[in-house]
Image (tube, helix red, strand yellow):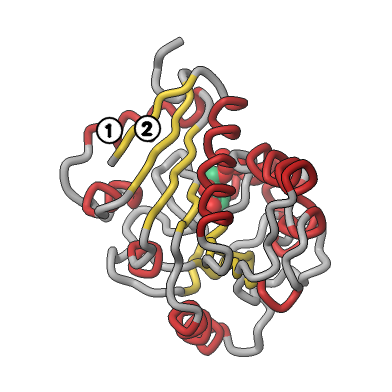
């Protein structure tokens, strides 16, 4: 794991956007694995600025997202479909049939999970997977205890994850109980991974990740120590440097 310590979230987002836009320019038909949550919001803003100012085109780029809540329609303001539309797709020239998220409303979620992994393989696999980290070390929605080899699957969210995401929904009760997420096995197949970590609330998880020597299912992010190409951009608060 290559750790890039930065002063704050602004610099983290700038560095992340630079890495992503460099890949998009060097490999115009790359497959980007994208993430949601508060952490990457500014990275998407900066990518939108880069598109406007430098005409970085996404016409041949394909994107696949990590996860989606079960039971929310694509139009629900809290769905990750809507998040991606509002934070990224509407600002760049990526064609609508080239960006993908799991369908949390599929009639058969099991079928949807298998189809999602097969679709990623058909695209040629993910070139760069953007990740955030949950306070309990979850990546995507892979909660502690998840098998490290698993593909895309349905998860029951822990109370701590639902509580952390309640800020987007207004109350914890409104947060769905389940989600569809790329599995740790799916994530680990990405050619490279970029993990963003910002803020005091992530310091404990960051510290545990830095101390991880081998993958431990109780702390899903620890699997990253066994991937050959992981970059972590972490700000001072997450690194206990303030
Ligand atoms: C959610 C998402 C993850 C995200 C994590 C951290 O549960 N499914 O992909 O990395 O929370 O979110 P945030 O960046 O808002 O702290």
Residue at position x 51%, y 28% in the image: 201
98 or 171, nearer to the observer = 98
- In space, the residues marked 1 and 2 are separated at their CA atoms by 6 Å
On screen, 118 above or below 29? below
On screen, 198 above or below 212? above
Residue 20 in the image: state x and y as whole percent: 55, 49
Q: In the drawing, does residue 144 fall left or right of residue 39?
A: left
Residue that numbered label 1 is attached to: 210
Q: Please identify the quadrant where the N terminus is shown.
A: top left
Residue 114 in the image: state x and y as whole percent: 47, 85
Residue at position x 73%, y 53% in the image: 88
216 or 239, nearer to the observer = 239
Crowding at mark 1 (Cα within 10 Å: few <14, some 14-19, many 20+): some
Label tally: 2
Residue that numbered label 2 is attached to: 206
Residue at position x 51%, y 56% in the image: 26
Q: In the drawing, does residue 118 fall left or right of residue 102?
A: left
- Say if disc 2 is inside 8 Å of ligand 1: no
| Residue 160 visible in the displayed image | no
109 or 226, nearer to the observer = 226
Residue 231 in the image: state x and y as whole percent: 37, 42
User: Tag 2, which secondary structure?
Assistant: helix
User: Tag 1, which secondary structure?
Assistant: helix
Quadrant of the rendered structure where residue 85 is? bottom right
Do tag 1 and tag 2 residues touch (Cβ < 8 Å)? yes
Q: In the drawing, does residue 89 fall left or right of residue 98?
A: right
């Amino acid at each position: 794991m290559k750790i890039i310590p930065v002063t704050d979230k602004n610099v983290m987002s700038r560095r992340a956007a630079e890495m992503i836009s460099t890949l998009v320019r060097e490999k115009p038909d790359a497959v980007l694995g994208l993430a949601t949550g508060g952490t990457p919001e500014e990275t998407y803003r900066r990518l939108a600025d880069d598109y406007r100012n430098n005409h970085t085109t996404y016409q041949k780029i394909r994107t696949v997202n990590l996860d989606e809540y079960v039971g929310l329609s694509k139009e629900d303001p809290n769905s990750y479909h809507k998040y991606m539309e509002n934070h990224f797709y509407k600002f760049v020239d990526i064609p609508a049939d080239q960006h993908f998220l799991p369908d949390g409303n599929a009639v058969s979620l099991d079928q949807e999970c298998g189809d999602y992994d097969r679709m990623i393989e058909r695209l040629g696999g993910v070139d760069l997977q953007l990740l955030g980290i949950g306070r309990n070390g979850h990546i995507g929605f892979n909660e502690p205890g998840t098998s490290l080899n698993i593909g895309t699957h349905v998860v029951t969210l822990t109370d701590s994850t639902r509580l952390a995401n309640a800020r987007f929904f207004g109350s914890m009760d409104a947060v769905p109980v389940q989600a569809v997420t790329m599995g740790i096995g799916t994530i680990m197949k990405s050619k490279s991974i970029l993990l963003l970590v910002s803020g005091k609330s992530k310091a404990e998880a960051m510290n545990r990740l830095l101390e991880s020597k081998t993958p431990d299912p109780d702390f899903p992010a620890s699997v990253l120590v066994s991937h050959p190409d992981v970059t972590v951009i972490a700000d001072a608060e997450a690194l206990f440097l303030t």
